[in-house]
């Protein structure tokens, strides 16, 4: 299982592996109980773990950096339900974190997610984007200016003739319909 396929689903606890996505939702597999289910996009939002960033006192960092710091710190993670212990843990493990903007609930969630990742032996790393070689586009062949002007003059009368035909065809049915209405009025008996 790859870290790039992991998602968090709003309203559902834990982490999920994205199996397949559809226009109206996604099929996900829970990392906790290994059940597969459909998650509707009308009710839930899916967030890839790779896209989550954490506020720091400098620039934002990816969640992978925090997980790697937690991994290298070793030791036991705090109880995810104890907010004070969780904050002390992150002050020791990742002191650059902006504790004014990262809420206690977010820190608890990071501890819980980290334990799920460790339990499932998932390698915590971002996918590397392959650099493509730049494509060199060839400039289109230029035609002499005189030839382009001749072509545009030749095409212009044809367009005018086509529009005149269309106008006359539209007018013909309208002219034919008008006499029928007049005939219908004449045929109607007059009221006394």
Image: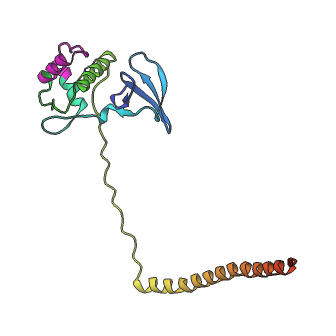
Q: Which residues are magenta?
A: 70-91
Residue at image location 16% in from the left, 34% down from the top: 56
**In-image side of 172 versus 13 (left or right):** right
Work out whether 88 lies above or below 141.
above
x and y, in percent, of residue 85 in the image: 17, 16
Q: Is 46 on the left or on the right of 80, as rendered?
A: right
Pick the quarter of the image with the C terminus. bottom right
In the image, what residue occupies the spot 44% across and 23% down? 29
In which image quadrant can residue 74 be found?
top left
* Residue 160 x/y as whole percent: 58, 84
Q: Residue furthest front?
A: 192
Q: How many marks?
A: 0
Determine if the magenta segment contains residue 90.
yes
In the rendered image, residue 81 lying in the magenta stretch gets the answer yes
Here the colouring is rainbow
Q: Tell me: residue 5, above or below residue 14.
A: below
Taking depth in this image into account, of 113 and 142 the one nearest to the observer is: 113
- In the picture provided, is 158 more to the left or to the right than 178? left
Quarter of the image where the N terminus is located: top left
Q: Nearer the viewer, residue 71 or 94?
A: 94
Q: Nearer the viewer, residue 4 or 10?
A: 10
Q: Residue at x 19, y 12 (%)?
A: 76
Left or right: 122 in relation to 35: left
Q: Horizontal and vertical percent for residue 132?
A: 32, 48
Give percent across and percent down for residue 94: 14, 26
- The residue that appears at 64% across and 81% down in the rendered structure is 167
């Amino acid at each position: 299982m790859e870290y790039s396929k992991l998602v968090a689903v709003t309203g559902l606890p834990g982490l999920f592996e994205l199996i397949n996505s559809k226009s109206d939702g996604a099929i996900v597999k829970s990392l906790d109980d290994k059940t597969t289910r459909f998650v509707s996009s009308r009710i839930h939002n899916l967030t890839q773990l790779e896209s989550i960033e954490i506020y720091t006192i400098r620039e934002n960092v990816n969640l992978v950096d925090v997980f790697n710091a937690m991994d290298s710190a070793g030791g036991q993670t705090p109880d995810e339900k104890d907010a004070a212990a969780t904050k002390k843990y992150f002050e020791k493990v990742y002191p650059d974190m902006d504790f004014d903007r990262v809420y206690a609930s977010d820190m608890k969630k990071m501890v819980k997610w980290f334990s799920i990742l460790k339990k499932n032996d998932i390698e915590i790393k971002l996918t590397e984007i392959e650099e493509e070689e730049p494509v060199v586009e060839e400039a289109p062949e230029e035609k002499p200016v005189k030839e382009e002007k001749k072509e545009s003059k030749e095409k212009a009368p044809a367009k005018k003739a086509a529009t005149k035909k269309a106008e006359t065809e539209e007018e013909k049915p309208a002219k034919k319909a008008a006499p029928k209405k007049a005939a219908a009025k004449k045929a109607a008996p007059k009221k006394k």
